[in-house]
Amino acid sequence: MITLLTIGYSAMVQKRTEVTMTVVGEANVLDVHSPRRDLQLIFRGEDLQQTNSNLRIVAVRVENTGHFDILQGHYDQREPWGFRVEGGRIVEARVATANSAYLARALNPVIRGDALVFDKPILERGKYVVVESTIVHTKGSSPRVKSFGKIAGVDEIPVEVATESPKVSRWRLIYEGPLWVHPIRAVIYTIAFFLALSLVGPLGIAVADVAEKKRRKGRQRLADSLGARSDLSSPLHEPWLKLYVDRGRDALLKSLSLVSDTNRLNATVRIVNAHPTVWNRALTESHLPTRGAKLPADDLAVRQARHIVSHSPDLRVLGALLQLGVIRIPDDGMAEVPQEAIRALREVIGAVG
């Protein structure tokens, strides 16, 4: 069942190639809320106060968030890739951190005009690099990072802004809320649990039933093919082939084990003789030997028979063989299994593999 759910989940989750740029941090280099005449903020010969500009550092994480490694041949070699800042000008850039030493040295961010351009390194799945850029922009504006470039399998490189959620302890998640909420939660969780069981149980039975029907069809095809052979077409082979179709090769092996051991076989027969009414009633109605047969709940004899047979695997095998007619129980209570029938059983086991 777990395997089926895993396969279903894997089918729903489509594997893809993906690169994501995430703004993980922004900070002003200096916070000057009100201009002062005697204060000068000079950056590379430019007075930021006079030009009403601000200096901000923006950290962008470039990460392979897909399911596949991105090789150098996956980049469009005719187009650059990287990001630009709308509403601002990049004046400085460097690699701040990475979870790959190769990526930290191979990305090589370079400022070209209003954009930050990267080299095209191998970007393995789950690997990332954080690039810090110094940006000059007009005060009061909000510069925005925008990606560019083409990678095979990626329609567009999304740019996200990281948001920090307040950390809540696991214990708080358990006991959070007023006291009257917990009984309601208990009832809801219990109902949900049993509802899930009620859905999973029938599904598992249905899957097993479909699988068994498929295996039975396969056994039927093989039995039909073997029955057409001259060496397996006698009346002695027919019941064993029928047993194989109904219950598989394991039932043949159990039957051979029982009929080959006279002491064990007659010990099983003694169980039958000790409960003749129960056995004859159940056997007549064909309830016991048939796997999955439904027994009348109000029939005491059948309930007793079901209990006896369920605790004796050999008795189940004997019931099946009696129904097939390959075993006879005479008046003296000693089972008789013709040697020709045992030989035919061995031949069928050898034929079905």
Image (spheres, grey):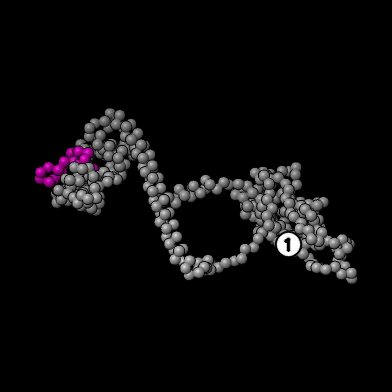
At 17% from the left edge and 45% from the top edge, which residue is drawn? 281
Front residue of 282/257: it is: 282
Please tell me in which quadrant of the rendered image residue 291 appears.
Answer: top left
At 47% from the left edge and 49% from the top edge, which residue is drawn? 5
- Residue found at the very far front of the displayed protein: 180
Please tell me in which quadrant of the rendered image residue 187 appears.
Answer: bottom left
- Per the picture, the main secondary structure of the magenta-coloured stretch is loop
At 20% from the left edge and 36% from the top edge, which residue is drawn? 340
At 62% from the left edge and 54% from the top edge, which residue is drawn? 126
Which span is picked out in magenta? 320-339
Residue 92 seen in the current view = no
Tell whether 100 sits left or right of 50: left
Residue marked by disc 1: 26
Front residue of 287/274: it is: 287
Element type at mark 1: strand
For label 1, count other residues whose C-alpha is less than 10 Å away and answer few (under 14), some (14-19) or many (20+). Answer: some
Q: Amino acid at mark 1?
A: Glu
Front residue of 279/64: it is: 279
- The answer to whether 2 is drawn above or below residue 59 in the figure is above
